[in-house]
Image (cartoon, rainbow, N blue to C red):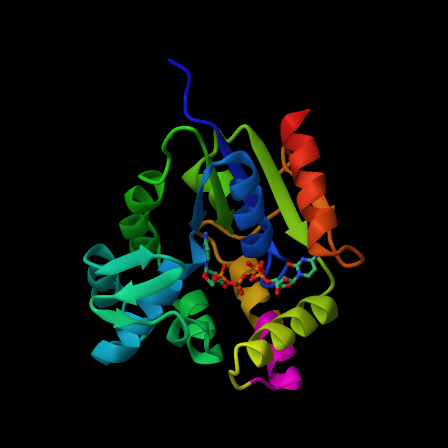
Amino acid sequence: TRPVPVIAIDGPSASGKGTVAARVAEALGYHCLDSGSLYRLVALAAMRAGVSFDDEPDVAALAGSLPARFAEGRVFLGDEDVTEAIRTEEASVGASKVAVLAEVRAALLDRQREYRHAPGLVAEGRDIGSVIFPDAGTKFFLTATAQARAERRYKQLIEKGMAANMESLLKDLQDRDARDAARPVAPLQKLPDAVLLDTTEMDVEQAVGFVLDRVRS
Ligand code: CDP
Ligand code: CDP
């Protein structure tokens, strides 16, 4: 039997991975995995439990028993709707801090692989093509300039009625990218077998079109 096809989309913060992955999944009728939300949930669970982001055994225990649920576009931690709470700057920074811990990444590995169901999966994150699904049929590395990405994130937060400051957003994003790229475990990287897509001058439509063309060819 043929393995269920996977499309891997990795890249830095606000490069458009989530938006593009969701649109591509919809076009193909595939399932979709936003792996970053798992790291965000772990960070939020640690904040709620008063566990420090660098306390590896305790954070990994939280990751291993994470009561995460995804339903109708909302994200739940236990009974609580945390869709907005996981998008704050504090949770974003926390996510990238717990993401450096090898035990935390190990605790989330199987959970991510379980999303691979027929007819196919579009998964996005930082290590989808390198660690989670190294056998993915098509791999993309989505990127854009830091300025363009910070502006996108700013617009997104304002539209949701959330607090946003352009200067601190840009700084957080650059610090987070640096931490993601420099870590020894599963660093953010452009793999040799990934297709590079710089979306700085593209809108969502164009980025989705590019990915679909590549997948279909
Ligand atoms: O998942 P990731 O953090 O990479 O990005 P996202 O959450 O999808 O956010 C990207 C934001 O930029 C969304 O509001 C998109 O509508 C917008 N955008 C994009 O994704 N791609 C472009 N080529 C242009 C804008
Ligand atoms: O939406 P944005 O691209 O800003 O972040 P995200 O994809 O939600 O991921 C939040 C953080 O989780 C990232 O900064 C990474 O540190 C971590 N992450 C990771 O290490 N591996 C993944 N596959 C996905 C996210």
As for residue 172 lying within the magenta part, the answer is yes
Q: Which residue is nearer to you in this view: 82 or 27?
A: 27
Q: Is residue 76 left or right of residue 148?
A: left
Q: Position of residue 91 (x, y in %)?
A: 41, 74
Which residue is found at the position 44% from the left and 40% from the top? Answer: 131
Determine the image quadrant of residue 178: bottom right
Vertical relation: 110 (above or below) 43: above
Residue closer to the observer: 138 or 21: 21
Q: Quadrant of the N terminus?
A: top left
Residue 135 lies, in percent from the top left, at 48, 28
196 vs 200: above or below: above
Q: Which corner quadrant holds the C terminus?
A: top right
Q: Is residue 85 above or below residue 203?
A: below
Q: Is residue 199 magenta?
A: no
Is residue 201 positioned above or below 172 on the image? above
Residue at point 63%, 46% (across, down): 141
- Horizontally, residue 141 falls left or right of residue 59, namely right
